[in-house]
Amino acid sequence: MKMTIVGVLLAAGLALTLSGCTSNLGNQEEVMLPEISMVEARTTQNDELRQIMTHVPDEIIVKNYGLVPQSRAMSCNWADEKPMNPEEGIFLAGRAKIDAKPGADLLEVLKEIRTAYEGKSGWKVSPAEKANLVGTDEGIVLESSEGYRYHVDVSTETRGDGILRISASSFSPCFQIPDDFDIDAEY
């Protein structure tokens, strides 16, 4: 139970940090949020998550969980416990994960992903600030020129059965709330 709560809190903290939706103190210029459709935000993330996971060799995969099911959009000011509003915008998050065989060199897989994205035009690659989360030894953050962020981390600590995990969490940039947005819908 404690691990579930810790996991939820860590995911929420990552969502805040990686989505770029945390508030800055002091005077701010008004920022014009981009217009992105819900379909575009989800499709962009899912396509890139699939691309990231292609770097995991088939021969080390025990289980590919694929992409998480659709989810609700989040307010970019959710940490302030304020309702959604047009000034702050919304974002979508996503995730993909794979379990790997005992002894698989996931650090090498992470290195391959890092190298691939360092070579892609318009992408920034940086070490993850919280790379030592529970069961995680290494992580990187990939950011596209459009502001989509992907946190890729690998576990080098095995579970009781020796299985390792690589996961990628995605966060769209904050964007304008579309006219056809339904707060209860999953996208």
Image (cartoon, grey):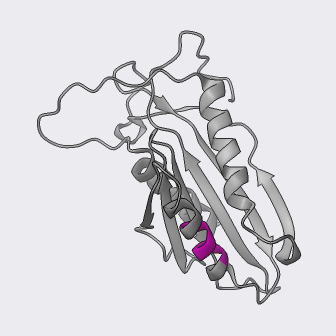
Magenta-drawn stretch contains 110: yes
- Residue at image x 33%, y 44%? 22
Magenta-drawn stretch contains 179: no
Q: Is residue 116 visible?
A: yes
Left or right: 147 as drawn, with respect to 25: right
Which quarter of the figure has residue 103? bottom right
- Above or below 145: residue 5: below
- Outermost residue on the left side: it is 27
Which quarter of the figure has residue 166? bottom right
Left or right: 168 as drawn, with respect to 145: right
- Residue 112, image x, y percentages: 62, 72
- Residue at image x 76%, y 84%? 104
Q: In the rendered image, which quarter contains the N terminus?
A: bottom right
- Residue at image x 74%, y 83%? 159
- Outermost residue on the bottom side: it is 103
Which quarter of the figure has residue 45? top right
- Residue 96, image x, y percentages: 71, 55
- Residue 85, image x, y percentages: 40, 20
Left or right: 26 as drawn, with respect to 12: left
Q: In the rendered image, which quarter contains the C terminus?
A: top right
Query: Which region shows up in magenta?
Result: 109-114
Left or right: 137 as drawn, with respect to 44: left
- Above or below 155: residue 183: above
Q: Is the magenta stretch mostly helix, strand or loop?
A: helix
- Residue 115, image x, y percentages: 55, 69
- Residue at image x 57%, y 56%? 8
